[in-house]
Image (cartoon, helix red, strand yellow):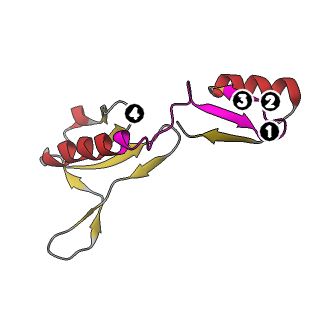
C-alpha cells in the first residue's frame, strides 16, 4: 500500500511506495508533532474511508487544500522555532533544542507552547 504523508507546514506530500504500483494508498497528515490518518466520508453511505485508489489523484489535491487551510490557521508546530515557557521557572525558550538544553541544565521537564 502506498503511504502519502501531507506536511501541514510546507504543504509537501511525500509518497512512499509510489514506484511499487500499489492499487491503494492511505494519507497521513503531519502537524510537526503528530501523524493522523486522513479519512473521507463516502457520499453514498456516509461511512468514513481512509483507503483510496492510487488512481484517485484528486484526493492528493484535496489533502493539499486541507493542509493549506490548517496552515492558514496555524494548526502545526514548528519545533525548530516554536516558543515555549518552562512551567517550573517561567523562562521563555525558542525551539526544541533550547528546551532540551534547559532540561539538561536544570532538570526541568514541564514546558508549554506559547501560541504565535
Question: What label sits on residue 9 in the rendered view?
Answer: 4
- The x and y percentages for residue 77 are 51, 37
Label 3 near label 4: C-beta < 8 Å?
A: no
Would you say residue 2 is visible in this rendering? no
- Expressed as whole percent of the image width and height from the top left, the position of residue 92 reads 71, 29
| CB within 8 Å, label 1 to label 2 | yes
Instruction: Give the Cα separation between the discs numbered 2 and 3.
Output: 13 Å
Bounds of the magenta segment: 70-93
Residue holding disc 3: 92
Label 1: element kind: loop
Mark 1 and mark 2: Cα distance apart in space: 6 Å
Dot in front, 4 or 3: 3
* First of labels 2, 4 by sequence position: 4
Where in the figure is residue 42, as x and y percent of width and height? 20, 68
Would residue 74 be counted in the magenta stretch? yes
Looking at the rendered structure, which numbered label has been put on residue 103? 2
Magenta stretch: includes residue 84 = yes
Mark toward the start of the polypeptide (3 vs 1) = 3
Q: Earlier in the sequence, mark 1 or mark 2?
A: 2
Q: Rounded to the nearest whole Å, what is the CA distance between mark 2 and mark 4?
A: 27 Å
Say few, some or many: other residues with alpha carbon within 10 Å of mark 1 (under 14 / 14 to 19 / 20 or more).
few
Amino acid at each position: 500500500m502506498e503511504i502519502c504523508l501531507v506536511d501541514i507546514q510546507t504543504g509537501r506530500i511525500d509518497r512512499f511506495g509510489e514506484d511499487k504500483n500499489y492499487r491503494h494508498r492511505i494519507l497521513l497528515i503531519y502537524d510537526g508533532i503528530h501523524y493522523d490518518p486522513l479519512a473521507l466520508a463516502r457520499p453514498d453511505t456516509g461511512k468514513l474511508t481512509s483507503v483510496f485508489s492510487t488512481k484517485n489523484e484528486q484526493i492528493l489535491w484535496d489533502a493539499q487544500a486541507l493542509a493549506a487551510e490548517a496552515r492558514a490557521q496555524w494548526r502545526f508546530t514548528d519545533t525548530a522555532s516554536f516558543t515555549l515557557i518552562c512551567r517550573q521557572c517561567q523562562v521563555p525558550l525558542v525551539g526544541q533544542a533550547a528546551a532540551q538544553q534547559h532540561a539538561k541544565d536544570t532538570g526541568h521537564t514541564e514546558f508549554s507552547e506559547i501560541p504565535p
